[in-house]
Amino acid sequence: MSAVDQDTREALGDIKGAINRGFEDVNKRIDKLVTQGEFNATVQRIDAQHETLRRDFDGHEKRTNVIISDNRAADAAVLEKAEGAVQKVRQEIHKDLDGFRSTTKWAVGIAVTLAGLAFGVASWLLSL
């Protein structure tokens, strides 16, 4: 083999190596872009999921606040109704106690009167 052939083969080998290295660099760059694109797509998916969860949470929070508000209003109505019922029972108890006091006063008055009459009759009978 002549020196020219040898130089040509070496030059072709160098060119072939450079081409292979170029393809390897291009492949690495494509892999990096694909990986970076996949990463970006993953980040976008996670951001979208986060936004969906945030909207759902906000919706649930609003519904929960409405339920709490409704429950507070219902509790206030029940409390007001219960206070009215307690007041009514108190009035009935006072009325019954007033009636009992009047009855007791009459009963004591009648008992004292009868005792006085009995004492008077007994005294009269003893004086005969």
Image (cartoon, rainbow, N blue to C red):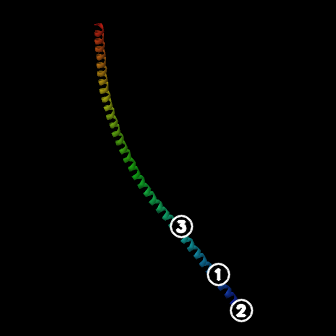
Q: Which residue appears at 31% of the width and 32% of the height?
A: 92
Q: Give whichever of 91, 51 is nearer the camera.
A: 91
Q: Is residue 54 left or right of residue 14?
A: left
- SS of the residue under disc 1: helix
Mark seen at residue 39: 3
Residue name at image x 63 percent, y 80 percent: 18
Q: Assess whether mark 1 and mark 3 are in contact (beta carbons under 8 angstroms).
A: no
CB-based contact (under 8 Å), mark 1 and mark 2: no
**Where does the N terminus fall, quadrant-wise?**
bottom right
> Element type at marker 3?
helix
Label 3, label 1: how many angstroms apart (C-alpha)?
32 Å
**Mark 3 crowdedness (10 Å alpha carbons): few <14, some 14-19, many ≥20:** few
| Residue position for label 1 | 17
45 or 121, nearer to the observer: 121
67 versus 90 height, above or below: below
Query: Which of pointers 3 and 2 lies earlier in the amino acid sequence?
Result: 2
> Disc 3 vs disc 1: which is toward the camera?
3
Q: Which mark is residue 2?
A: 2
Name the kind of residue labelled 2 in the image: Ser
Image location of residue 119, percent across then percent down: 31, 13
Rendering coords of residue 6 (x, y %) = 70, 88
**Can you give x and y, in whole percent of width and height, for residue 9 in the image?**
67, 87
- What whole-number distance in Å separates the C-alpha atoms at marks 3 and 2? 54 Å
Place residue 85 in its image quadrant.
top left
Choose between 86 and 122: the one closer to the eye. 122
- Asked where in the image residue 107 lies, by quadrant, the reply is top left
Ranked by sequence position, the earlier of labels 1 and 2 is: 2
